[in-house]
Image: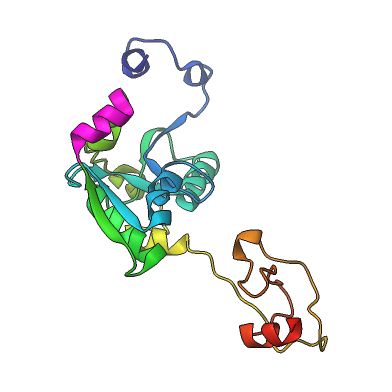
Amino acid sequence: LLKNWYSQNANIEPVTNLGKRLVKFRIGIVLSNDGGALVEFKKPLRFGVAAILGNGKQLVSWVHIDDLCKLFISGIENENLSCSYNAVAPNPVRNKILTLTLAKAMKRKFFIPMQVPAFVLKIMMGQRSVEVLKSTTVSCKKIQDAGFEFTFKTIEAALENHKPVLILDRPNPNGFYVDGPVLDMQFKSFVGMQPIPIVYGMTIGEYALMLT
């Protein structure tokens, strides 16, 4: 299929045959909290383990989900874009750096780096292990030369952007009770295992006094 897709003789681009502009994006590893590779990278970190795959030297060409959406919009709206472009950030990163940067963003100093040998990955994943162990150095120079500006150019900026931030207002204007909707249940407090309100918040101490 790929050979046919990139073959110059294959008539698989009916859009251009109709005189329409065609833009194709080759998409790298997408970083998103809603699924994909980033969610898989996070799984070992739930147990405090930063799992470095193989020797960790393989390069990963990645792109932040926000930049990918911007690329799609640019492909639609920018009449000067045509042909193929690489949808990857300007700075590919080694697997070890990506894993440790994500661990620091999630756990700060409370994690243990652990290398997962290539042979273990091959036993666990079979042929799929090839994809996580190979290097993919892809350039985005062509799309940058066309005027596109990436918001997240470094892995540090991309991973910091995916950290959830909780803001609780205080003082509580309703006296001795808390009003308003609650946060996701994963953010429930240790005080009586009550869900933390998203509005009219109070300190943990004030919350404890209210419940006792």
- Where residue 211 appears, x then y in whole percent? 74, 81
- Whether 119 is among the magenta residues is yes
Residue for point 66% across, 60% down:
185
Q: Nearer the viewer, residue 121 or 102?
A: 121
Q: Nearer the viewer, residue 181 or 21?
A: 181
**Rendered view: 137 above or below 42:** above
Visible residue check, residue 94:
no
Q: Determine which quarter of the picture holds residue 209.
A: bottom right
- Where residue 119 appears, x then y in whole percent? 19, 32
- Where residue 72 appears, x then y in whole percent? 51, 42
Residue for point 68% across, 83% down:
208
Q: Nearer the viewer, residue 18 or 112?
A: 112
On the rendered structure, is 159 left or right of 118? right
- Where residue 115 appears, x then y in whole percent? 22, 48
- Which quadrant does the N terminus fall into? top left
**Rendered view: 166 above or below 158:** below
- Which quadrant does the C terminus fall into? bottom right
Residue for point 48% across, 63% down:
163
* First to last magenta residue range: 117-126
**Rendered view: 59 above or below 24:** below
On the rendered structure, is 5 left or right of 117? right
Residue for point 38% across, 50% down:
44
Visible residue check, residue 71:
yes
